[in-house]
Image (cartoon, coloured by chain):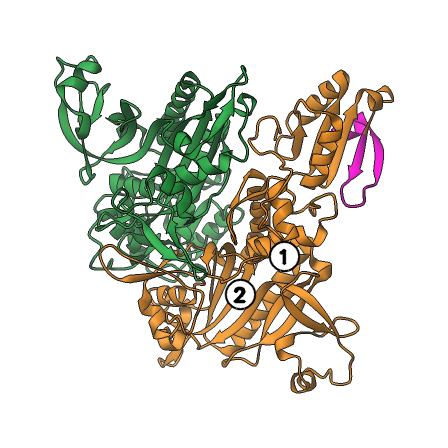
Chain colours: A green, B orange
Amino acid sequence: MRLSKTFIKTLREAPKDETAKNGAYLIRAGYVHKEMAGVYDYLPLGLRVIDNIKAIIRDELNRIGCEELSLTTLQNPEPWEKTGRFDDQEVDIWFKTELTSGGVLGLAPTHEEPVTNLMKSYLSSYKDLPVAVYQFQTKFRNELRAKSGLMRGREFLMKDLYSFHTSEEDLDAFYTKVEDAYRRIFERAGIGGCTYETFASGGIFSKYSHEFQTMLPVGEDTIYYNNDKSVVLNKEVYNDEVLADLGASGETFEETTAAEVANIFKLKHKYSKPLGLNFIDENNKQQTVYMGCYGIGISRLMGVIAEKYADDKGLVWPDTVAPFQYHLIGIGEKGIAEAEKFYAGRENRVLYDDRDKRPGEKFADAELMGIPLRIVISDRTLEEGMAEITDRKTGKSWTIAISELFEK
Amino acid sequence: MRLSKTFIKTLREAPKDETAKNGAYLIRAGYVHKEMAGVYDYLPLGLRVIDNIKAIIRDELNRIGCEELSLTTLQNPEPWEKTGRFDDQEVDIWFKTELTSGGVLGLAPTHEEPVTNLMKSYLSSYKDLPVAVYQFQTKFRNELRAKSGLMRGREFLMKDLYSFHTSEEDLDAFYTKVEDAYRRIFERAGIGGCTYETFASGGIFSKYSHEFQTMLPVGEDTIYYNNDKSVVLNKEVYNDEVLADLGASGETFEETTAAEVANIFKLKHKYSKPLGLNFIDENNKQQTVYMGCYGIGISRLMGVIAEKYADDKGLVWPDTVAPFQYHLIGIGEKGIAEAEKFYAGRENRVLYDDRDKRPGEKFADAELMGIPLRIVISDRTLEEGMAEITDRKTGKSWTIAISELFEK
């Protein structure tokens, strides 16, 4: 992409009400635009990061046999009334609206009820199971406060996966597969080393659920971890009974803040029972379907990665989610001619700053935008047939022969 | 995709309230699921059709220099109040909702106001123009009645493109590029031969706008066309004055029904003026930005294609938008073994019916699902080293040597 051809510009300042580092940098670097607290537009660079995150997740979920679909935002109250969750006393983050033709609708904050209801048209026999479906879908949550940039949205992108099984054993086995897939996803997204599977409250149907928590100073959650971080607990379940349960009674735990990037949950019969999602088993007997649900906050993940790695100069993207791999700058007549040559045919991997601006301004923008490797080709470096590469993360620079660069 | 591995099934019946042919077939064939009138979930096959349509549009728009972004559903009233369009008397299809923290929000029925507002952060000089941005975004319209299947949605997917220019001439030149791109899009999507650019009312800022109308018995619009279909008009502008204007006074016009799949509009200063989207020109003078907007109904397009080509046996997809190219059926032990061999490595192009069902049922499902070419490999065809191919559209069958099939 040529910077001269895109409408986005880096901005000197973020809006005054944007107090979160991730939000401020993402706005200033031209990745997102803020509509209101917790509601962001994705500009071309931001959309590329989102698409990269989605591609990693899609790849890992397809690999374990999940199918992609897309459910709606507008929600008929009926299935939610059956589970008691349409009530604002029960779920206090609904956005609701009204049909001109009469009747209240909700904007989906999650999709357990509609997906359970939908499956009644498709699942009837044990032969139809197991099934696992996922979507990338915008969710709406009427948060009283939304001050953490992309880490807490009123309108945000989520990957939600739902699984359906004949037995608890089959649910357990699939749950383990998702745990593994999630570890691979966070590893590939560049936060594997600071993201831990965390015991959390399971509600009334399961003893525990699991969260994936990324350690982060501004994270909204508090977690406790033992010495080798093999046991990590959300504050809500950090007590003697649970520690005994996990065989970690004698150990010392440290407290830290973290951001929840995913949660997984054995729902068992929580939604399938009230909504009547049943199947006929091998003995011709009717049984209730076992369910699990597994979420990853996509826009939150983008916010967490931004927050985690940003330094005082701007964003720092892991190369797997970065919108481009190289930030190219040509300096001087020959440098620009050579940069143009390098750019040709690499438009999809190179962000080329071909604007009529001073090198200093281009360098500052490159640091703000956070593309992994900056390539500078200048008249001076060309004198020795070289280009200069700078790693955004470490700040280290080195030179490379132009011929070698072109072979990349 | 293996039919044995997907949760979708063909259904004997569509819901009773689904009176539109496109909606009924898309539900029965497992492409969509109906949540309520005008609100549909996309199941794996339906999502693939949507993705194919999006890929064609993205390709054509990127080619003319447009950039992709993604705007939000939740709408702050402020910019809409400046143009007078937040008023329900003015725009009668709003869904509105309320923030817990106070204040009314709207669900975007279109995005002229937010995109104009957003550009105020990025456009300030003639050097920043022209700009053209588009998105694939869910729109919400509180329709009193929604009875045309995917052709009229309360929640529906749209591609909307907005362009920004220094002058009317530059807007005109870009408008022509979009017209050409749209013709290519509809040609590639398989409805080029029955879709016509149609004069329609331009509102107060332009004499005409243009629609792309697909001739269709159940279309909700009425259009008039001359002998060679070189002049096509929406009923709303079919009068002597307009015919004179277009130099078509003496000609005979026929009336027919059609479905609007796209509309394009020279907005000029309609939104940029009240929202204050200005730029500084070459002479350092402040000017108002010229705008155009260009929409394509993505889910409607899917509905129109389904409606247009479906026959009494089911759906018939053009190969460019079909979710798969081949519907594979193996019959008999050797037939199935050979089908498995053909399927391996072609998972993304072949819908393989490997279910334990009678051939007759599989043939009926293949017709309902509408994949362009059915391939049958049976013990009988294998005796002569052949497979049978059937064109879904024409119903014609022919045989092909297995060796030749594998070379495809």
Residue A21 horizontal/vertical position (percent): 22, 48
Dot 1 falls on a residue whose secondary structure is helix
Under mark 2, the amino acid is Tyr
Looking at the picture, tell me which residue is in the foreground, B139 or A106: A106
Residue B8 horizontal/vertical position (percent): 57, 34
- Asked if residue A234 can be seen in this view, the reply is yes
Say few, some or many: other residues with alpha carbon within 10 Å of mark 1 (under 14 / 14 to 19 / 20 or more): many
Same chain, marks 1 and 2?
yes
- Quick check: B384 left or right of A96? right
Looking at the picture, tell me which residue is in the foreground, A240 or A41: A240
At 57% across and 49% down in the image, what residue appears? B55
What count of labels does the image hold? 2
Is residue B80 one of those drawn in magenta?
Answer: no
Q: Which residue is mark 1?
A: B185
Above or below: residue B95 compared with residue B201:
above
At 45% across and 42% down in the image, what residue appears? A402
Q: What is the CA distance from the residue labelled 1 to the residue labelled 2? A: 13 Å
Among the 4 quarters of the image, the one containing residue A298: top left
Among the 4 quarters of the image, the one containing residue A43: bottom left
At 49% across and 62% down in the image, what residue appears? B143
- Quick check: B382 left or right of B31? right
| Label pair 1/2, CB-CB below 8 angstroms | no
Q: Which residue is mark 2?
A: B294
